[in-house]
Amino acid sequence: SQKIEQNSEALNIQEGKTATLTCNYTNYSPAYLQWYRQDPGRGPVFLLLIRENEKEKRKERLKVTFDTTLKQSLFHITASQPADSATYLCALDIGTNAGKSTFGDGTTLTVKP
Amino acid sequence: NAGVTQTPKFQVLKTGQSMTLQCAQDMNHEYMSWYRQDPGMGLRLIHYSVGAGITDQGEVPNGYNVSRSTTEDFPLRLLSAAPSQTSVYFCASSYSVDSGGASTDTQYFGPGTRLTVL
């Protein structure tokens, strides 16, 4: 079965810096990879999706990279703000059916003013 | 659109009791899923459905049943609750559409049901 590891449980950075979160996977390569944000007591909210044939995807201050050779995705938040503090989850899909994702345990990001 | 709604928000059960967690979506999505999330962990897939009348098991299906009689609703039934089923349950719906030759698969999650089994 697919195994996903997110680099650390917690990441603390100073406001204005770039936060970089890592998602590593084993076994077969996913068709695409998604990143979600989860705030305490709430459901995950979709942020970005990147496909296996894409190297990089951007959305405003967010950037995701996907390296199928290293079996790794990096998630960057530039010019971080305290409002970016949350838990970030990566999820893999093999592409046969939507809604059948394998999630990592998440990384909790804290941005200090 | 209300999106994905779940009821109840909180529930306490005694061991051996049964109950149904409700999930509804008004976005006409084909796919619906149930996940559970234990403290400090990611989501694990319980069951999912690719359309009305079609369901399949996920990673942790034991002790749970589902059915999908309509596109909108996807209830999750706990047959005989056990303390190991104490968790937060999330329902999600998603679609897969072609947009300029590329499909888009995005899941929308409900607010969750926090279940405690004593």
Image: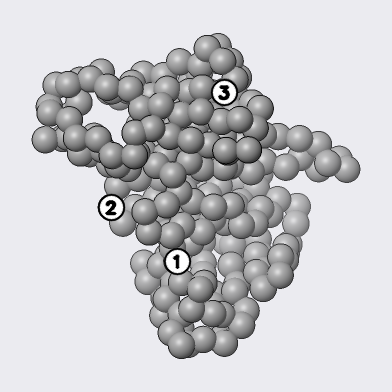
Q: Position of residue A44 (x, y in %)?
A: 49, 51
Q: Which residue is mark 2?
A: B39
Tag shown at residue A86: 1
Residue position for label 3? B72
- Residue at point 48%, 35% (across, down): B5
The answer for which chain carries disc 1 is A
User: In what element is the residue under mark 3?
Assistant: loop
**Which quarter of the image is occupied by the N terminus of chain A?**
top left
Q: Amino acid at mark 2?
A: Pro
Secondary structure of the residue carrying numbered label 2: loop
How is colour applied across the structure in the image? one colour
Residue type marked 1: Ala
Nearer the camera: disc 1 or disc 3: 3
Q: Give A41 or A14, whichever is nearer the viewer.
A: A41
Quarter-of-image position of residue B95: top right
Q: Earlier in the sequence, mark 3 or mark 2?
A: 2
Contact (Cβ within 8 Å) of mark 1 with mark 3 = no
In this rendered view, identify the residue nearer to me: A69 or B90: B90
Q: Classify mark 3: residues with Cα within 10 Å, few (<14), some (14-19) or many (20+).
A: many
Q: Position of residue A107 (x, y in %)?
A: 42, 65
> Does residue B93 appear left or right of residue B19 in this picture?
right
Q: Residue at x 56, y 86 (%)?
A: A17
Percent of width and height locating residue A18: 57, 82
**Residue type marked 3:** Glu
Horizontal arrangement in the rendering, residue B105 relative to residue B81 (left or right)? right
Disc 1 crowd rating (10 Å Cα; few below 14, some 14-19, many 20+) is: some
In what element is the residue under mark 1?
strand
Looking at the rendered structure, whether the residues under marks 3 and 2 are on a common chain is answered as yes
Distance from label 1 to label 3 (Cα)? 30 Å
Residue at horizontal 56%, vertical 30%?
B25
Instruction: Indicate the position of residue A51 as horizontal and vertical percent values.
Output: 70, 50
